[in-house]
Amino acid sequence: MTAPHALPEPGWPTREGARDARLVQPGSLGPCSARTRTGVPAMVPWRATDEGFVTPAVLDWYGRFADGKPGVLVVEATGIRDVPSGPLLRIGHDRFLPGLRDLVRVVHARSEGETRLLIQIIDFLSIRRRPQRERFLRQFLGLREAHRVALAALAGHAAAAAGDEASVREALVSLSDDELRGVLDERELEALERGARERVTDTHLPHVAELPRVLPGLFADAAARAQDAGFDGVELHFAHAYTMASFLSRRNDRDDGYGGSREGRVRCPREVTEAVRERVGAGFTLGCRLLGDEVIEGGSRVEDAAWYSVELARAGLDFVSVSKGGKFEDAKVPRVGEAIYPYTGESGHECMPTVRIGDPGPFGRNLPLARGVRDALRAAGLATPVVGAGGIGTFAAAEQALGRGDCDFVGAARATLADPDWFLKAEQGRGTQVRRCIYTNYCEGLDQRHKEVTCQLWDRDLERNDPGRDSVQRTRDGKRRLVAPPGSASPPLPPPSARCASKGG
């Protein structure tokens, strides 16, 4: 195992030293101005209801981030289809609007109007849990003539191959794993060993073939609801293992004009962008989360991401937030009864690098991708801002990323999860009070199991002589703090210097 990299020296500034830093200057995401160039990227905390509604725990989660007054806060990936998707927020129907309006009110109130609130909207295709072997063969496998032919070629199975469906299925159950691999095709083996997963290239399925004609309207409807709810903007989820990133992937070989070439691969995302922009108008911020590198065999690289970003910016994007990896293709084989998790293979480790990743380590590891996208936008004459992220946990690292021109805004998910006040503390000269992320991905392990996401550092306060420990909100199992510890008293900020044009202040 790779030896862990040491956390970098924080180099916290004094209050006076931070005053003129790039990080604390106002920045614009299209029509929306943020107080600082700091951002909290979307994180799924698994606090919604199973029906996708906002809960008090959701309000507490985002309210606590708002206490730290980041320039921008992005709400978790929120489903645009009105379909069951577990405890993930949804925006596919008007019935979700009351809770989303409550969320906007809470964040704007607790940040004293200083945090711009965006919501990330996502589409995803069907994925099933890894099935038990016998159940898959007896119930889920769609029998084909090819199965009978392959079975008949195996010694002792000719009679079963010629029998009724039940006989064929029982014969398949009796095969060794090696024999079964000679009977099932590649996708059937995947369904057995990793869980069935739809792809955007499954155009033999009518609902997949229709995606380019359906998705623009679904995303536009969702964005309009976000605008109605009072959000300052939306972020289109074009990254990681999900539908829109799959259209952008080099592995997308659809032959209907929505795959193959770069022009074909960007077509559906471009049409989604155009549809959303037309629906919400020019005064509402619209951005996307995009992969700078898929980190899988045959996947897209930064050159593709840079080209896509230019095309999408021309189609109406106000900003591009750059991520990396997080794909199904190289994920670990799940246990029976569990779903495959796209952050367990190499691409997942590159998405959220830990202190045990190889050289040059996790800190700012993915910023060159943001720089590649930003350089391409500037070369095309576009001033579209770029959000960079990935292991940025100190004021100095964030300031350097902005100073080098890697990005225009800095996103920090795990560092802000560890301490929702860290940007604010650094700005106020209180960096020594920051609870620093140690980049072990404890939080990711909880996410993988769809447990309420928390930070292991929060719980240290429960183990100390914390006079309020008995009243602390805890997770369902009672073992972990549900909300980050409250911040300590701090001096007031200067008067607000930026407002969101789309909200009129």
Image (spheres, rainbow, N blue to C red):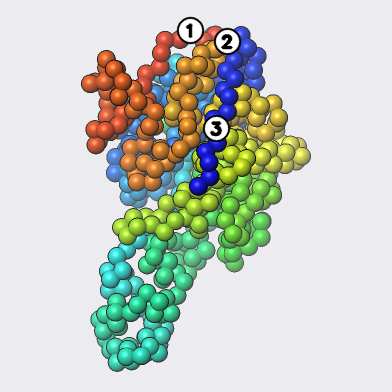
Q: Where is residue 313 drawn, in percent x and y?
A: 65, 41
Q: Compared to 185, does 148 lie above or below?
A: below
Q: Please report whichever mark, 2 or 1, sits nearer to the chain's N-terminal start.
A: 2
Callout 1 secondary element: loop
Q: CA distance from mark 3 to mark 1?
A: 31 Å
Q: Which residue is mark 2?
A: 15
Q: Is residue 296 visible?
A: yes
Q: Where is residue 312 drawn, in percent x and y?
A: 63, 44
Q: Where is residue 71 drawn, in percent x and y?
A: 53, 23
Q: Please report whichever mark, 3 or 1, sits nearer to the chain's N-terminal start.
A: 3
Callout 2 secondary element: helix
Residue shown at 34% from the left, 55% from the top? 338
Name the residue nearer the viewer: 463 or 271.
463
- Quarter of image, res 53: top left
Q: CA distance from mark 3 to mark 2?
A: 26 Å
Name the residue nearer the viewer: 52 or 451.
451
| Mark 1 surroundings: few (<14), some (14-19) or many (≥20) residues within 10 A | few
| Mark 2 surroundings: few (<14), some (14-19) or many (≥20) residues within 10 A | some
Which label sits in the foreground, 3 or 2?
Answer: 3
Residue shown at 42% from the left, 59% from the top? 333
Q: CA distance from mark 2 to mark 1?
A: 10 Å
Which label sits in the foreground, 3 or 1?
Answer: 3
Q: Which residue is mark 1?
A: 491
Q: Which residue is mark 3?
A: 6
Q: Where is residue 309 drawn, in percent x and y?
A: 65, 44
Q: Is residue 285 visible?
A: no
Q: Amino acid at mark 1?
A: Pro
- Mark number displayed over residue 410: none
- Pointers 2 and 1 in contact (CB under 8 A)? yes
Residue shown at 40% from the left, 76% from the top? 178
Q: Compared to 341, does 46 lie above or below?
A: above
Q: Amino acid at mark 2?
A: Arg
